Image (cartoon, rainbow, N blue to C red):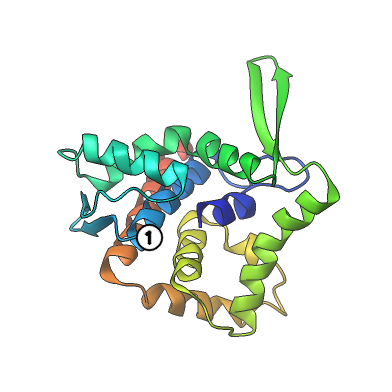
Amino acid sequence: MADQFYLIAHEDRTGRSRLHPRATELGLAAALVGELVLLERVRISGGELTVVSSEPPGDALAHNLLDLLIVQRHHRDLRTWLAFLAQEAVVDVGERLRRAGVVEPVTHRNLRGTQTLYMPMNPNQRNTAAWAAARLANILVHERAMDLADRVLAGLVLATGLTRYVLWDVDSHRPGLPRMYAAVESLSPDLLELVEHTEACVGSVLAAGRR
């Protein structure tokens, strides 16, 4: 799920974030937490994140995140965790995509130093990256069955302001918007909390940037 969010949130030609960078980071952090909820390793209730199973996930990134949550299990505030995980989320998910062969790290130099972007560099990689948004739009517009991961992904797209990059064609994609809201409303209470807290965190970041 975090991989799909990453590909939707970044330009497939430049590797740059389509959103305010902090909004993308928070969305990725939420997607990583959401993966652990779907794996039934953590639970969210009342704004708190609680480990309910210490069984290691098969994915290395999810495994590392769960280990961190276990070690710091006395820290439960969800928004604090989202802010913390957001600091490394782009690199963490970018590296997972690199290992999967979907992107390649590209280092740019500028007046402020260097920046590494994870970019699709060949036609196959670009097709994979572009398909992330197109796939979700296709599911929403044509009312195809949505699994739980896609419903959470739709919620995080809404929460972070990525909707216009998924449902980009105002006329043909119009039916997809109510379907997206319905998908969010169908989420379990803990996953709905995750989406709502993500939206609130992103809103706070954007409001602070306008001051």
Number of marks in the image? 1
Vertical placement of residue 201 versus 109, above or below: below
Q: Which residue is mark 1?
A: 195
Q: From where the camera sits, is residue 108 visible?
A: yes
Q: Is residue 98 left or right of residue 47?
A: right
Residue ID at (66%, 18%)? 114
Who's the residue at 24% across and 57% down the image? 44
Q: Residues within 10 Å of mark 1 (few under 14, many from 20)?
A: many
Farthest residue to the left: give it: 74
Residue 51 in picture, x, y percent from top left: 22, 50
In the rendered view, tell whether residue 14 sits above or below residue 172. above
Q: Position of residue 25 (x, y in %)?
A: 49, 41
Q: From what the image shows, is residue 51 above or below residue 37?
A: above
The residue lying at 45 percent from left, 42 percent from top is 61
Q: Residue furthest right?
A: 123
Question: Picture coordinates of residue 184 (x, y %)?
Answer: 41, 72
Residue 106 picture quarter: top right
Q: Position of residue 78 (x, y in %)?
A: 27, 47
Q: Residue at x 71, y 62 (%)?
A: 131
Q: Amino acid at mark 1?
A: Val
Q: Quadrant of the C terminus?
A: top left
Image position of 27 (left or right of 204):
right
In which quarter of the view is residue 187 placed?
bottom left
**Front residue of 38 and 198:** 38
